[in-house]
Amino acid sequence: MEMDKRVVLTGLFVIAIIGIFLFTILNRAPTLTISSSSGEHVFSVEVADNLASQSKGLMFRKSLRESRGMLFVWKDEQTRSFWMKNTLIPLDMIFIDSNWTVVEINKNAVPCEETECSVYDSRIPAQYVLEINGGLGDGLGINVGDRASF
């Protein structure tokens, strides 16, 4: 009888450890790396790949950790437009083409809680846009021509 309890408890312990391990692995945020002349910069990203998540973006966030960002993903490459409606923190918008090359950077986009907000357009077609804390791109030495990988 005592042996059966130990076997059951050991089994439950093993199942719990496996569950914790799987939860950790499956809930890890995807990462995007930008390789620049100053080194490799890795960001844990939330992926916005549908209209609902792209429309909301980083609205209403009071802060964003330095190693975090939001990656907007589209099926095609074209010029992109963003606005900062209800966005509370300044952001750098890093436009990336289908070959994973940084093609443009809008620096320190200004938060907007007004009815009329500035629009931040890319002049060059992009398939991806990485939003990170405003000024961080300059601080890390991220420039047009740098390479990204996801």
Image (tube, helix red, strand yellow):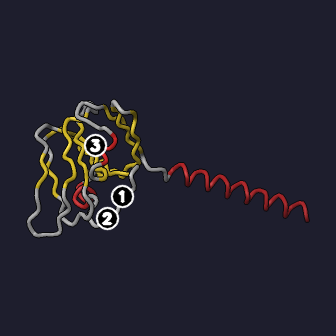
What residue is disc 3 on? 138
Q: Secondary structure at mark 2?
A: loop
Q: Nearer the viewer, residue 78 or 31?
A: 31
Q: Are marks 2 and 1 in contact (CB under 8 Å)?
A: yes
Q: Give the residue furthest to the front.
A: 139
Going 24% across and 38% down the picture, which residue do you hit?
96
Camera-nearest residue between 123 and 143: 143
Among the two numbered marks 1 and 3 on one chain, the one whose residue lies closer to the N terminus: 1
* Other residues around mark 3 within 10 Å, as few (<14) / some (14–19) / many (≥20): few
Horizontal relation, residue 150 to residue 50: left or right: right
Image position, residue 10 (x, y; %): 79, 57
Earlier-in-chain disc, 2 versus 3: 2
Query: In the drawing, what numbered circle is on residue 126?
Result: none
The number of numbered discs placed on residues in the rendered structure image is: 3
Which residue is drawn at the image coordinates 79% and 61% (left, top)?
A: 8
Cα separation between marks 1 and 3: 17 Å
| Residue designated by label 1 | 64
Identify the amino acid type marked 1: Leu
Residue at which label 2 appears: 61
